[in-house]
Image (cartoon, rainbow, N blue to C red):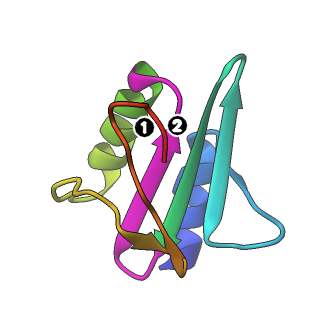
Amino acid sequence: WFKVINSILVTFGFVNSIVNHNIYYLHHSHDFAILTLYVNKTMIANNCLLLLQSIKNQLHSKFLLFSFDKVHYILSLQVICNIHYGWL
């Protein structure tokens, strides 16, 4: 499974982290995305809605995707989101 997802993410332009192989990053000009994989969950953090939509469309073309829920924990880290202030 890892070889398949890794190959697909690399073709999308993501680079696999050397430190943690569950983390991928993508950088285009001023836009970036960080994608984490954990068992059957994926989290995408980025700074551009158009980039996010593009990534989701690319992933959807290869995999069956389910709803994108709020994240509470990822990779043993607690995630706190404040939409009013725009931060995690």
Image coords of residue 77 (percent x, y): 54, 74
Viewer-side residue, 46 vs 13: 46
Q: Residue furthest right?
A: 18
The mark closer to the camera, 1 or 2, is 2
Which residue corresponds to the image point at 58% horizontal and 74% vertical from the top-left? 3
In the visual, does 66 lie left or right of 52?
A: left
Q: Identify the element where label 1 is drawn.
A: helix
In the visual, does 76 lie left or right of 23?
A: left
Image coords of residue 59 (percent x, y): 36, 48
Residue, disc 2:
46
Mark seen at residue 20? none
Which residue corresponds to the image point at 42% horizontal and 82% vertical from the top-left? 39
Crowd class of label 2 (few under 14; some 14 to 19; many from 20; radius 10 Å): some
Image coords of residue 87 (percent x, y): 48, 39
Crowd class of label 1 (few under 14; some 14 to 19; many from 20; radius 10 Å): some
Q: Identify the element where label 2 is drawn.
A: strand
- Answer whether residue 59 is magenta in the image: no
In the visual, does 49 lie left or right of 4?
A: left
67 in relation to 52, above or below:
below
Viewer-side residue, 59 vs 3: 59
Q: Report, in whole angstroms, how far the alpha carbon at label 1 lies from the one at label 2.
A: 10 Å
40 in relation to 65, above or below:
below
In the visual, does 58 lie left or right of 29?
A: left
Instruction: Please report whichever mark, 1 or 2, sits nearer to the chain's N-terminal start.
Output: 2
Q: Which residues are magenta?
A: 38-49
Which residue corresponds to the image point at 82% horizontal and 71% vertical from the top-left? 19
- Answer whether residue 46 is magenta in the image: yes
Image coords of residue 81 (percent x, y): 39, 49
Q: Are marks 1 and 2 in contact (CB under 8 Å)?
A: yes
Viewer-side residue, 50 vs 6: 50
